[in-house]
Image: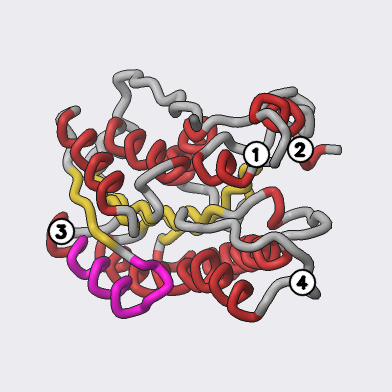
Amino acid sequence: MAKETNIKGNGMARVQDKVALVTGAAQGIGRATALLLGREGAAVAVADTNARDGEAVAEQIRAAGGKSRFWALDVSKEAEVAAVIAEVGKEFGRLDILVNNAGISGANGTSEEISEAEWDRVMNTNAKSVFLCTKHAVPLMRRSGGGSIVNLSSVYGIVGSHNVAAYHASKGAIRIMSKTDALAYAEDGIRVNSVHPGFIWTPMLEAGAQVPGVAPEAVHSAMAKLHPLGTLGEPGDVAYGILYLASDEAKFVTGCELVIDGGYTAR
């Protein structure tokens, strides 16, 4: 089982009265981020293709006294993105925070080994989605007087590895797109930053860590050793970084890369 998030309440309200949209919020980093933003005072629009778990996240926020609603959303389809963001604006009156978290790992393989369809699926879900959500969120943020966009890249948006070519390409695209949009929308008071997690024990990583004939504990241990800190990250480790970038504490931070990787890229 994927490890539960390490989110803890602290009585602060670091995004009080802000409105946040989190894509891919049904599980993993997105779930942890939605719960944390809700706990810190934001109204949270939870978006995902997974309606059952997404509804559960929104209900958990409401049960804790927060405001939240779930929207079913395929982030690779512009008509759906435009409709959901418009509905978020009507529901909550504004949009201050966009967390572009939705993503997939896609097929393993080098550029030579994967198919065009496999490439397109990863790029559409991971990179095109950031373009679409940003495109339709910016006008709403501009009317609100500014905002914060946080894009989930990866350590593999900074360094490479020997396979999973489409995933790496998509995360690299997100990294540079974040800098480009940071410059494009700075005058509007819209900050854009990217977050680069290392190996975080989420359902996606857990599913990808299944090795025939090898015990899950051994795979987990091997991945943990890739990080100088000797452990895998938890969803909450990334969620707190996103919270910082979303909050006014980061009012002078735009176009940056926040690396949360246990030292993976420091070698």
Instruction: Say which element carries label 4.
Output: loop
Of badges 2 and 3, nearer the viewer stands 2
Answer with mark 1 or mark 4, whichever residue precedes in sequence: 4
Q: Determine which residue is flagged by label 2.
A: 264
Of badges 2 and 1, nearer the viewer stands 1
Residue depicted at x 58% and y 42%: 205
- The residue lying toward the viewer, choosing from 184 and 53, is 53
Asked if residue 250 can be seen in this view, the reply is no
Residue 216 lies in the magenta-colored region: no
Residue depicted at x 38% and y 41%: 31
Answer with mark 2 or mark 1, whichever residue precedes in sequence: 1
Residue 31 vertical position relative to residue 1 in the rendered view, above or below: below
Q: From the top left corner, tell me how far across and down residue 23 is, in percent.
A: 38, 55
Picture quarter with the C terminus: top right
Going by the numbered disc 3, the residue's amino acid type is Gly
* Magenta stretch, residue numbers: 74-88
Q: Is residue 257 left or right of residue 222?
A: left
Look at the image and name its color scheme. secondary structure
Answer with mark 3 or mark 4, whichever residue precedes in sequence: 3
Answer with mark 2 or mark 3, whichever residue precedes in sequence: 3
Residue depicted at x 57% and y 63%: 178
Answer with mark 3 or mark 1, whichever residue precedes in sequence: 3
Q: Determine which residue is flagged by label 4.
A: 113
Q: Is residue 223 left or right of residue 244?
A: right
- The residue lying toward the viewer, choosing from 214 and 40, is 214
Q: Determine which residue is flagged by label 1.
A: 199
Disc 2 versus disc 3: distance between alpha carbons?
Answer: 41 Å
Q: Determine which residue is flagged by label 3.
A: 93
Q: Does the residue at mark 3 contact the one at mark 4 (Cβ under 8 Å)? A: no
